[in-house]
Image: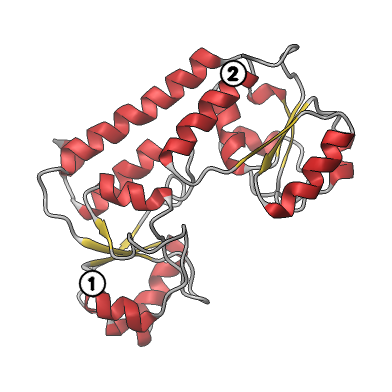
């Protein structure tokens, strides 16, 4: 059920929810976003109200919203409480998995009076994920290390949507059994686990390939450092299907042309 009345002035301080709001056809109702909400391109024309974490409540109130979408975290709880006290309807969402994306998209569709469009977005993503899984199901499964951050060295763990995407794309995350979405690891342990490939962002690839320390990995020495597309990989949102296609193309070249 949608809000009554349906919100017409929405502040979204969460890149994922901002993308979803645009995808379900309600982007023209956005009157505020965070620094990090930059996709789709239309989001850049929405007023920037500052940080997503520990947001500036005064800036939010100045936008006169009738709905505020926050990232669900302890850091944002005080802002949520202040907004609620001011009579502003506030919804806090945390999307770390594909299923959470589905449920959050359908929820936003109901809240914003766009349930059919929300269902269409979810169905489109799901169809692509099914197609990618089918294309890679009979192929070998390379063991993957996903490089998230260098200092400290971070990767993706069991509770990340990226762990799900690697599986769908026909790979095995070497830290797939490690709890949490982004555990801190050591290079020595990565080398001990001996991944077949290393997935990195475009900003990291050159430095990693040139690093003497990273030469301890067989995958790096043998040139199996693969660069993923950061425009679609990295957000648990409407680009999940495209992210799966990108990863499958890297892990299994030619698989998505069948």
Q: Which residue is mark 1?
A: 223
**Does residue 198 appear left or right of residue 78 in this picture?**
left
Q: In the image, is residue 179 above or below residue 237?
A: below
Q: How is the image coloured?
A: secondary structure
Q: Is residue 16 left or right of residue 129?
A: right
Residue under the point 60% across and 28% down: 21
Nearer-the-camera pick, 138 or 26: 138
Residue 232: x and y in percent read: 43, 44
Specify whether residue 41 is in view.
Answer: no
Whether residue 121 is visible here, answered yes or no, is yes
Callout 2: few (<14), some (14-19), or many (20+) C-alpha neighbours within 10 Å?
Answer: some
Q: Residue at x 46, y 47 (%)?
A: 231
The picture quadrant where one finds residue 138 is top left
**Which residue was labeled with disc 2?**
110
Measure how far apart labels 1 and 2 are at the Cα level: 48 Å
- Residue 176, horizontal then vertical, whole percent: 33, 59
Tell me which residue sits at (59%, 25%) in the image: 108
Q: Nearer the viewer, residue 213 or 56?
A: 56
Mark 2 lies on a secondary structure that is helix
Q: Nearer the viewer, mark 1 or mark 2?
A: 2
Query: Considering the numbered disc 1 on the image, is that residue within a helix, a strand or a loop?
Result: loop
Quadrant (top left/top right/bottom left/bottom right) for the N terminus: top right
Tell me where residue 72 sits by quadrant: top right
First in sequence: mark 1 vs mark 2:
2
Decide if residue 241 is on the left or right side of residue 60: left
Q: Where in the figure is residue 110, as x and y percent of width and height?
A: 59, 18
């Amino acid at each position: 059920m949608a809000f009554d009345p349906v919100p017409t002035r929405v502040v979204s301080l969460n890149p994922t929810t901002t993308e979803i709001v645009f995808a379900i056809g309600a982007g023209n109702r956005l009157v505020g976003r965070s620094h990090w909400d930059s996709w789709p391109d239309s989001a850049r024309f929405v007023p920037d109200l500052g940080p997503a974490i520990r947001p500036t409540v005064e800036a939010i109130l100045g936008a006169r919203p009738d709905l505020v979408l926050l990232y669900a975290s302890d850091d944002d709880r005080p802002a949520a409480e202040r907004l609620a006290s001011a009579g502003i309807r506030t919804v806090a969402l945390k999307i770390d998995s594909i299923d959470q994306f589905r449920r959050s998209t359908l929820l936003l569709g109901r809240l914003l009076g766009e349930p059919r469009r929300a269902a269409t977005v979810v169905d489109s993503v799901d169809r692509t994920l099914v197609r990618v899984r089918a294309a890679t199901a009979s192929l070998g499964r390379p063991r993957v290390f996903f490089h998230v951050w260098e200092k400290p060295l971070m990767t993706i763990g069991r509770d990340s949507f990226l762990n799900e995407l690697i599986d769908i794309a026909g790979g095995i995350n070497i830290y797939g059994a490690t709890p949490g979405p982004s555990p801190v690891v050591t290079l020595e342990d990565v080398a001990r686990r001996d991944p077949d490939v290393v997935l990195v962002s475009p900003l990291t690839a050159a430095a990693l390939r040139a690093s003497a320390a990273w030469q301890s990995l067989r995958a790096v020495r043998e040139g199996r450092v693969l660069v993923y597309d950061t425009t679609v990989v990295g957000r648990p949102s409407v680009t999940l299907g495209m992210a799966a296609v990108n990863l499958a193309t890297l892990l299994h070249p030619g698989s998505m042309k069948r």
